Image (tube, rainbow, N blue to C red):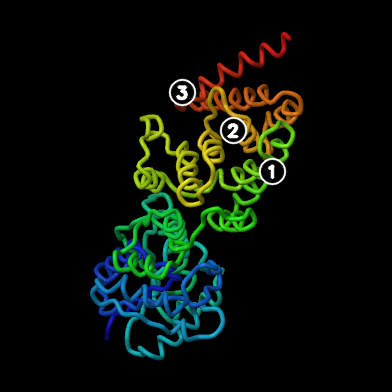
Amino acid sequence: MSRVGVYGGSYNPPHTGHVLAASELVRLLNLDRLLIVPAAIPPHKSLSVDSPTPEQRLALCRAAFASVPKAELCDLELRREGPSYTVDTLTQLRERYPEDELFFVMGTDMLLSFSTWKEPGRIAALASLAVMRRENDDSLWADACREAERLEQMYQTRVIPVENQCLPVSSTTVRRMLAFGAPWCLPPEVENMIRQEGWYLSGASLKGLPFERLREISLLLHNENRRAHVEGTARTAEELALRWGADPVAACRAGILHDITKALGPKEQLHLCENYGMMLTSIQRENPKLLHAKTGAAVAREIFAESDAVCDAIWWHTTGRKEMTPLEKVLYIADYMEPNRSFPGVELMRQLVETNLDAAVYHGLDQSIFHLREQGRVIDPDSLEGWKYYQKLTERSQLS
């Protein structure tokens, strides 16, 4: 009797995190074979419009997992019409391997939602469940281990926690980094194939796009829960530009791109900075949350070929600075007060910007610095200089 692991996923694209996980599964579960099962149409998510075809993803997987001993590609789901459900896949594999022990592999996040899947009891009867780490979070792992015990009792099956080494990275992040011109966590063979074919926007010309196409690409690269904010910022920036004499076209473009790299984590932000040759201050390195404005400006310039004015507005939209241009002020304020924003102080900003642009900037800087101090966080020197500068301007305007 052989021990057969079943490791499915979209693999869109397969990355070094997948490869490490596969190697760890073979080793820790003592597998005789590990079936890599790319999904055609996963029932819980849709594939991005710029993805390669299922057959092309199969080719990417063949390149990615070639170095993993005992790993074999299984195109069963790619040949099945309609959504790919785990219970259907395991039913077919049980027929194919009637005498072997099957181990269905899932991450901690999948295990915690397992009871909501289609026919979870049937899945548990067809295969033992092997749960592996997706990230180095001991609290999440403890939750998964408790859930494993509960599922064992509920379904009378084996649920095996696999204490694997992991590389916390998602295919979504890998796709974004390809679009930003900074490949990340890809096996060399996979990266070469993607570059040659231009998949995941890696070969697309994104320079000088009309606004509607720019908007479409921008929203594709943002997390879904940030899209309303980005669109709100673009509309508000355009309205403020018309009111205060800035370029409304530039304001709209800056607004739709201002958070373009916001979805990236600290390591990816630093990789982008290195990729674009950006010199960082010690404060910026120690506070990666500040970096999305800097990397966003670099992406706007290098990938989308936006004007210096647009890129500068994006660069300063988080920290602000003294002597901001009208466009920089407009984006800074629009980001703060767009219609989806709701927090103490935002209504005062909306009132101030009706009559005094500088007073609105001062209010935003004042509120940001207050909250940073309250949280014991470091304040960027540019924010402090800007706060002092606009405080004086506001005081003068009140005296005149």
| Residue found 61% across the figure and 13% down from its top | 392
Mark 2: which secondary structure?
helix
Q: In which quarter of the image is the N terminus?
A: bottom left
| Residue marked by disc 3 | 381
Query: How much space separates mark 2 and mark 1, taking CA atoms?
Result: 20 Å
Q: What residue type is labelled 3?
A: Pro
Q: Where is residue 246 in the image (x, y as percent from the top left)?
A: 67, 34
Quarter location, residue 160: bottom left
> Which is in the foreground here, disc 1 or disc 3?
3
Disc 2 crowd rating (10 Å Cα; few below 14, some 14-19, many 20+) is many
| Residue found 53% across the figure and 33% down from its top | 316
| Residue marked by disc 2 | 328
Q: Which mark identifies residue 340?
A: 1
Query: How much space separates mark 1 and mark 3, taking CA atoms?
Result: 29 Å
Quarter location, residue 394: top right
Q: Which amino acid does label 2 sit on?
A: Glu
Q: Quadrant of the C terminus?
A: top right
In terms of sequence position, does the residue under pointer 1 or pointer 3 come before the other? 1
| Residue found 37% across the figure and 59% down from its top | 133
Q: Which amino acid does label 1 sit on?
A: Asn
> Which is in the foreground here, disc 2 or disc 3?
2
Mark 3: which secondary structure?
helix
Question: Considering depth in this image, is 346 or 296 the residue closer to the camera?
Answer: 296
Question: Considering depth in this image, is 344 or 354 the residue closer to the camera?
Answer: 354
